[in-house]
Image: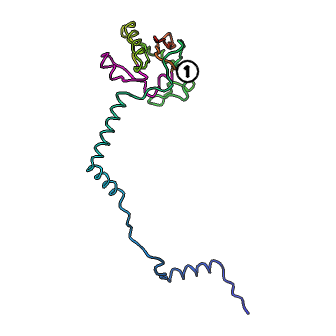
Amino acid sequence: MKRCIVSAPLVLGMMLGVAGARAMDLGVIGPTYEISEPHLLQMIEQRLREKERSGELGRLEAEARERGIATVKNPPPVAGLRATEAVRTFYFDPSFTLDRNLLGPHGELLFAAGTRKNPLEVVTLSRHLLFFDARDPRQVGRARQLIAIYQGRVKPILVGGSYLDLMQSWHVPVYYDQQGLLTRRLGITQVPALVSQEGLRLRIDELAVSP
C-alpha cells in the first residue's frame, strides 16, 4: 500500500478553504431578550425632577450655598498650632539651592544648578508678619497692641477665625494662612507669632498671651 504524505501547510490550507466555502447555520442556542435597563442619563434626570417637585433639590442647593458661605467666612483652622505656652525666639534662613539650570528666553544660562540664593538679598520684608488665632480674644487683643506699637507696619495673618469679621471691625486688610503653608514653612508651632527681618534672616518670636 502506498502512503500519501500531506504537508501541514497543505492541510491547513484545505481546512481554511473548506471553512471559507461553507457557512453553517447553528440555529438559536438560547432565548434572546431586548435590553430593558433604563438609560442612565434618563434615570438621573427623572430623579432630579422628582427631587425638584418634592422640594428636596432646593433644600440641598440652599445647604450647599450655606456651607460655601460658612467656609469663606470661617476657613478651616490651621492644624497643629496652639496658644503660646513657652515664649521662644528662633531664626529662619530663607535661602534655597537651585536643583536645575535656569535658562533665559533664548536658552541662555541665567543661574546654574547648585546656585544658592537668599530672596532677602533682592527684596526686604517691609512689614512684620503677625500670625494669630482670631477665635482667642487674648490673641486678638495682643495683635491690636502690636499693630499700634509698629504704627500699622504689620500684616495680620489668621490661623483660625473669621478674617472677614475682623476686616469689617478693624478696617484693614486681614489675611489667612491657607492650609498652614506659611506657618509650617517657618516652623511656627505657637501663636501669636511675630516674624521680622534681621539682616538676611527672619526672626520669629512666639509671643506670650495674658492668662
Q: How far across and how far down the image is residue 63, in percent?
A: 32, 38
Residue placed at 58% from the left, 79% from the top?
13
- The colour scheme is rainbow
Q: Hey, which residue is sitting farthest left in the picture?
A: 53
> Residue 58: x percent and y percent?
28, 44
**Image quadrant of residue 133?**
top left
Q: Residue at x 32, y 32 (%)?
A: 69
Q: Would residue 106 be found to the left or right of residue 166 on screen? A: right
Q: Residue 178, located in which quarter of the rendered image? A: top left
Answer with left or right where residue 186 lies relative to residue 74: right
Is 166 in the magenta?
A: yes
Q: Position of residue 65 (x, y in %)?
A: 31, 37
Front position in the image: 51 or 199 = 51
Residue 126: quadrant of the picture: top left
For label 1, the SS is: strand
What residue would you read off at disc 1? 116
Residue lying at the far right of the rendered structure:
1
| Residue in the foreground of this view, choosing between 51 and 109 | 51
What's the residue at 53%, 28% (across, down)? Answer: 101
Q: What's under tag 1, amino acid-wise?
A: Arg
Front residue of 66/28: it is 66
Task: Provide the residue span drawn in magenta.
Answer: 157-185
Q: Please name the residue shown 27% across and 46% down the image.
A: 55
Looking at this view, name the residue that lies furthest to the bottom. Answer: 1
